[in-house]
Structures are given as C-alpha cells and as structure tokens.
Image: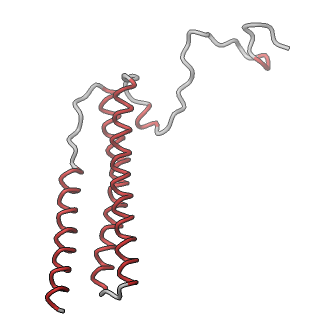
Amino acid sequence: MTSEGEAPGGAAPRDPEASPPDDRRPRSVYGVGEEPDIRFSLANERTALAWVRTGLGLVAGGVALTSFASFADLTGFVDLIAAMACLAGAGFAGYALLSWKRVERAIRRGDPLPSPNGLPVLVAGVVVLALLVAGYAVTEVWRR
C-alpha cells in the first residue's frame, strides 16, 4: 500500500501542480508553441471535419454515378467522371489533415493563419465536374 502523496512502485511523488507529460501526436503540431484557447483548436478541428465530409460526399457521389451508370448501361465516360469525383474526394480528405496541421501550428505559435488554398481548388473542381455531367447529359439528349 502506498501512503498519500507517494507514487506506486516507490517512484518519486509527482507534483500535483505540474502539468502531465504531453504525449499527444503529431509532435510536429503539439510540440510547437503554447497551448491555445480551446475554442480556436476546436474550430480548426470542425473545419477539418467539414473538409473530410466534403471529400466523403464526392466519393459517395462517384460511387452513386458509377452504380447508376452500370444499371443504365451508360458509357464509360460516366465512370470516368465518377473516378474523378472519388479521386477529388480522397484529395480533399488529405487536404483536411494538412490544412488542420498548418492552422493548428499557426494558432499555437501565434502566427497569422495560412490562407485557405484548398477552397479555390474545390470550387474549380465542382464546376468542372458539373460542366462535364451537364455536357454529357445534353449530348445524350441530343443523340436520342
């Protein structure tokens, strides 16, 4: 049995005022700067999760397109668009992690926040996919 204030196993007692050792990962994020206001970290996490949801939505849309194409005997062009949507979704999920790291490090160091360079890419990608699907739909209607 250990008495009060004595650590188990005969180890030196830990100062109750001291902060616990920080073993959070990735060290490239949590080993930098000071602990920020929790609201900023949570907002950054919510933003990253929104990017992941966007990526997941693109992957789901790609799966839906290729499933629909197989049932409707559509050309391989629809499968190509579906593959592009799935790859874009994977890219945005990866971007979410990289962006979260960049922003979290900036918050912890007190640096200005980096620009959201994924947003223009997302908008351009969605516009291109929409134009490809619309163009395909119009050509299919005219072909019949």
Residue found farthest to the right: 1
* Residue at x 38% of width, y 45% of height: 49
* Residue at x 77% of width, y 18% of height: 8
Quarter of the image with the C terminus in it: bottom left
Q: Position of residue 77 (x, y in %)?
A: 27, 82
In the image, residue 139 above or below residue 131? below
Please indicate whether residue 64 sits to the left or right of residue 11 in the image.
left
Q: Position of residue 116 (x, y in %)?
A: 22, 44
Q: Give the image quarter of residue 131.
A: bottom left
* Residue at x 39% of width, y 32% of height: 42
Given residues 92 and 9, the one toward you in this image is 92
Quarter of the image with the N terminus in it: top right
Q: Position of residue 11 (x, y in %)?
A: 74, 17
Given residues 45 and 53, the one toward you in this image is 53
In the image, residue 96 above or below residue 87? above
Residue found farthest to the top: 4
Q: Position of residue 25 (x, y in %)?
A: 49, 38
Q: Give the image quarter of residue 75.
A: bottom left
Residue found farthest to the bottom: 144
Please indicate whether residue 74 sits to the left or right of residue 119 in the image.
right
